[in-house]
Amino acid sequence: MSDVMRTPRISKVVVNIGVGEAGDRLNKAQRVLKMLTNHQPKVTVAKVTNRDLGVREGMPIGCKVTLRRNDADEFLRKALAIREYRLASYSYDPEGNLSFGISDYTDFEGMKYDPEIGIFGMDISVVFSRPGYRVAKRRIAPKRIPREHRITREETQAFMRERFKVEVVD
């Protein structure tokens, strides 16, 4: 693109493992995220109570890591290699963000199965933005992002095709 302010970029990549309970499984999930990303995971807690699932509000149920800049780019390349650079069209939301899952952490290059840890899958969410999105997040005088400056699903798909050679499958 010719206009620098119109080019999309990766704002952040969030890697999430939901285990549904606190304790040993949560500690193992944190170890997996630490091994994969070299970042300290943050524990996520339940926002609402669900009696059917045995989850109370405020109970630790998972962990996540937020990656930015070069770390996000490198991790995304590894994750897309596992998916063979193919993503379904429904993985993109109307705001241009992208989410997909990995069924097992051992699919990553250099990871071996550890019987002590077990099998953990993860969700990967990629948030895209353009230069100027800070206007909506700033503390003093935040403003709305105009509709013509927001990212669409098609623009995100074109960005992923160009930068990561991703094939979008219907």
Image (cartoon, rainbow, N blue to C red):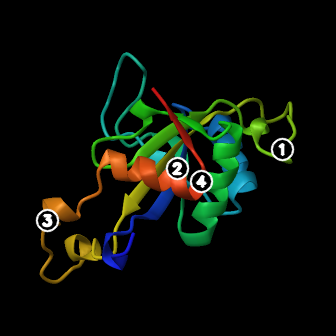
Quadrant assignment for the N terminus: bottom left
First-in-chain label (2 vs 3): 3
Instruction: Give how far across and how far down residue 151 sits, in percent.
Output: 29, 56
Residue type (three-letter) at the residue carrying disc 1: Met
Reading the image, the residue beneath label 2 is 161
Q: Are marks 2 and 4 in contact (CB under 8 Å)?
A: yes
Foreground mark, 1 or 2?
A: 2
Reading the image, the residue beneath label 3 is 146
Q: Is residue 66 left or right of residue 143?
A: right
Q: Is residue 17 left or right of residue 104?
A: left
First-in-chain label (3 vs 4): 3
Q: CA distance from mark 1 to mark 3?
A: 44 Å
Instruction: Give how far across and how far down residue 103 sits, in percent.
Output: 65, 29
Reading the image, the residue beneath label 4 is 164
**SS class, disc 4:** helix
Taking depth in this image into account, of 3 and 58 the one nearest to the observer is 3
Q: Toward which corner of the image does residue 145 lie, by quadrant?
A: bottom left
Q: Is residue 27 visible?
A: no
Taking depth in this image into account, of 125 and 44 the one nearest to the observer is 125
Categorize mark 2 by other alpha carbons within 10 Å: few (<14), some (14-19), many (20+): some
Categorize mark 1 by other alpha carbons within 10 Å: few (<14), some (14-19), many (20+): few
**SS class, disc 1:** loop
Q: At 33% from the left edge and 45% from the top edge, which residue is drawn? A: 153
Q: As drawn, which residue projects farthest toward the bottom?
A: 140
Reading the image, the residue beneath label 1 is 111
Q: CA distance from mark 2 to mark 3?
A: 25 Å
